[in-house]
Image (cartoon, rainbow, N blue to C red):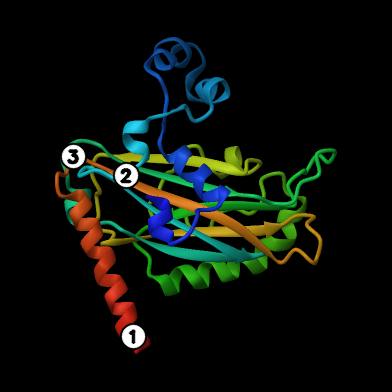
């Protein structure tokens, strides 16, 4: 229950992000559209799909959704730790990671660049927080000016294998205020550690100077044939919370 989790009513961005995380494409879509028009055609016809109420309201043993809602100063980035226990990465079959992002920027419908703020995200593995911060700080300095005139916006600081191959990518999603992408893998060739990091960025395009922070919400869903996945993630998050509480004392 999001109200109980946050201690207040979740904002509209959180509701949109959670709904997108629970969307699935109906089988007839794959049978009829995918064969003719591929995944891009599916997205154009069905969007992210229809809401599956069986997975909307709560996580399950083999499917865990982590959520966050916050604000971010423009032209900066935020980093969220995503637990990646070895039991998840080594589970049998294909593993799926789904990321959603929802935000509500100022808009001007008569402009070609109608979003006053653009946001994007990347899922990074095999790098420390310090390495990510340094890379994205340099990236911000180098790309901020170029991004203003680039049709592709700001590009990523890392490439594969450190940047997880979320599909669709930034270029496809950058004009949307509700973004969702997925990454599926069967196994990792290397051990990239038990923590991945979701990096979220906000870039001012034409938003007025008085608009300094952007509200957003994000979700990350891990899904695998591991019956203890929910308990593993829950214990990892509790441990981190206890460590942070001790550090503040």
Query: Where does residue 34 sit, x and y in percent of width and height?
Result: 45, 16
Residue 215 appearing in the image: yes
Describe the element under mark 2 as helix, strand or loop: loop
Give the mark toward the camera: 3 or 2. Answer: 2
What residue lies at 71% left-to-right and 44% top-to-bottom? 151
Q: Is residue 121 left or right of residue 243?
A: right
Q: Is residue 155 left or right of residue 91?
A: right
Q: Which of 45 and 104 is in front in this view?
A: 104
Q: Is residue 83 left or right of residue 124?
A: left
Describe the element under mark 3 as helix, strand or loop: loop
Marker disc for residue 58: 2
Residue 85 appearing in the image: no
Residue that badge 1 annotates: 247
The CA distance from mark 3 to mark 1 is: 35 Å
Query: Where does residue 162 sit, x and y in percent of width and height?
Result: 39, 56
Q: In which quarter of the image is residue 27?
A: top left
Marker disc for residue 225: 3
What residue lies at 71% left-to-right and 67% top-to-bottom? 212
Q: In which quarter of the image is residue 183?
A: top left
Give the mark toward the camera: 3 or 1. Answer: 1
């Amino acid at each position: 229950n999001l109200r109980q989790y946050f201690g207040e009513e979740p904002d509209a961005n959180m509701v949109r992000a959670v709904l997108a995380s629970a969307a699935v494409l109906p089988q007839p879509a794959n049978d009829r559209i995918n064969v003719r028009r591929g995944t891009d055609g599916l997205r154009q016809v069905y969007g992210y799909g229809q809401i599956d109420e069986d997975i909307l309201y709560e996580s399950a043993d083999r499917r865990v959704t982590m959520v966050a809602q916050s604000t971010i100063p423009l032209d900066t980035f935020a980093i969220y730790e995503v637990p990646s226990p070895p039991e998840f990465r080594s589970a049998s079959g294909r593993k799926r990671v789904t990321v959603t992002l929802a935000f509500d920027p100022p808009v001007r419908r008569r402009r070609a660049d109608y979003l006053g703020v653009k946001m994007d995200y990347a899922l990074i593995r095999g790098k420390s927080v310090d390495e990510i911060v340094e890379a994205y700080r340099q990236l911000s300095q180098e790309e901020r000016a170029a991004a203003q005139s680039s049709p592709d916006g700001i590009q990523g600081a890392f490439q594969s294998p450190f940047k997880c191959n979320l599909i669709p990518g930034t270029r496809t999603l950058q004009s949307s205020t509700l973004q969702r992408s997925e990454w599926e893998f069967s196994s990792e060739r290397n051990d990239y550690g038990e923590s991945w990091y979701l990096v979220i960025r906000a870039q001012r395009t034409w938003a007025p100077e008085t608009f300094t922070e952007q509200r957003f919400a994000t979700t990350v869903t891990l899904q695998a044939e591991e019956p203890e996945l929910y308990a593993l993630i829950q214990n990892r998050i509790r441990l981190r919370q206890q460590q942070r509480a001790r550090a503040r004392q």
